[in-house]
Structures are given as C-alpha cells and as structure tokens.
Amino acid sequence: MIEGLTIREGAAGDLNYVLSSWLRNYRTSIKTRGIESEVYYDQQHGHHAAIVAALQRANVLCAGVEPGQVLGWVCYEQPNIVHYIHIKYDFQRLGVARALLAAAGLRAPLVVTHWHSACDRATVRGDKLLYNPYLFFRGLHAASKNTGHE
C-alpha cells in the first residue's frame, strides 16, 4: 500500500484524464483488436461516445497522495458494476486498485464491462468476476436518439 494514499470523488477536472487514459489503455485490449481506430475513437458512435455516456451516469473515484493527483481511478455503478479501473503503471500492484474498489463499496460478485489483463490476474487469485460488456452500453441508443444521432 502507498503511504498517504487518499480516495476522493472524481472532479470535473479529472474527467479529461479519465477519458483519455481509458481510451488509450483499452485500445490495447484483445477485445478491441480488429476495430479500426476511426471507429473506436469516433466521438459520436465509437467507444469514445460510449465512455462519455457512461461517465454521465456512473461514479468515478480517484486515488492520489497529493491534492488533485490521480494515480488511478475507477468508474463504477452500484451495486456491483465496474466499467473500468486504471492505475498508472508505476503504481500498479501496490494496492491502489483494491483501495479504490473498497472505497466504492461494491458487493461481490463484481460485474466488469471491460475485460483486460488485470481481470485475468484477479481470477487467477480467486476473485469472482462476471463479464457483461452489454451493461456498458445501457442508455447509449436513447442518448443518440435524443441528440438526433443514429
């Protein structure tokens, strides 16, 4: 565990970092292979748009030592949905993710909407994770209808 680590609610100033790190990090996932970058990063119909929609309905917690610092973050919805968790490389495997999940107060089993290598490591440790990517896209179609985008 990192000494002095604090968990706080994500602020408006954190959201650009959350969005960009989520997009960059998940782009390397096996789950996005074969998706053209123009499609993945599309701000109206791609993963970018889906993340923006999720950030409007979900909660974000940030971890840091200094005020305003973000060593990692989690985007989640109660009671047990984890959309994404990102920890800066130098701070991985130091308990930051566990601290974020504990602060979120989610109950087991966790449902993850994005599967990546950290999920593989968690299941090897014996953590019970359910993968349901469809929960991530809830409300996206309704949002596109409201804005006139199909």
Image: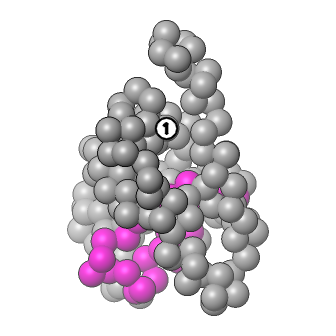
* Left or right of residue 124: residue 97: left
Over which residues does the magenta segment extend? Answer: 80-101
Q: Circle 1 is placed at which residue position? A: 50
Q: Considering the image in quadrants, where does the N terminus appear?
A: bottom left
Residue 63 appears in view? no
Percent x, y for residue 99? Answer: 50, 75
Mark 1: give few (<14), some (14-19) or many (20+) Cα within 10 Å: many
Q: Is residue 61 above or below residue 36?
A: below
In the image, taking residue 47 as reference, residue 139 lies left or right, namely: right
Query: Residue at coordinates 44% horizontally, 64% vertically from top-left?
Result: 29
Instruction: Kindly state the secondary structure of the residue where label 1 is placed.
Output: helix
Q: Is residue 148 left or right of residue 129?
A: left
Does residue 124 appear in this view? yes
Q: Residue at x 57, y 30 (%)?
A: 140
Three-letter code for the amino acid on which mark 1 is drawn:
Ala
User: Which picture quadrant has residue 33?
Assistant: bottom left
- Pinpoint residue 118: horizontal percent, then vertical percent: 50, 76
Q: Residue at x 30, y 50 (%)?
A: 20
Q: Position of residue 80 (x, y in %)?
A: 70, 58
Is residue 92 magenta-colored? yes
**Which residue is at the front of the view, 137 or 45?**
45
Tell me how the rendering is colored.
one colour
- Which residue reaches farthest front? 34
Tally of marks:
1
Above or below residue 93? Residue 40 is: above
Find residue 36 and report its image quarter: top left
**Magenta stretch encompasses residue 128:** no
Q: Is residue 12 above or below residue 95?
A: above
Residues 138 and 47: in front is 47
User: Which residue appears at 49% of the width and 10% of the height?
Assistant: 148
Image: 67 above or below 41:
below
Percent from the top left, x then y, of residue 12?
33, 40
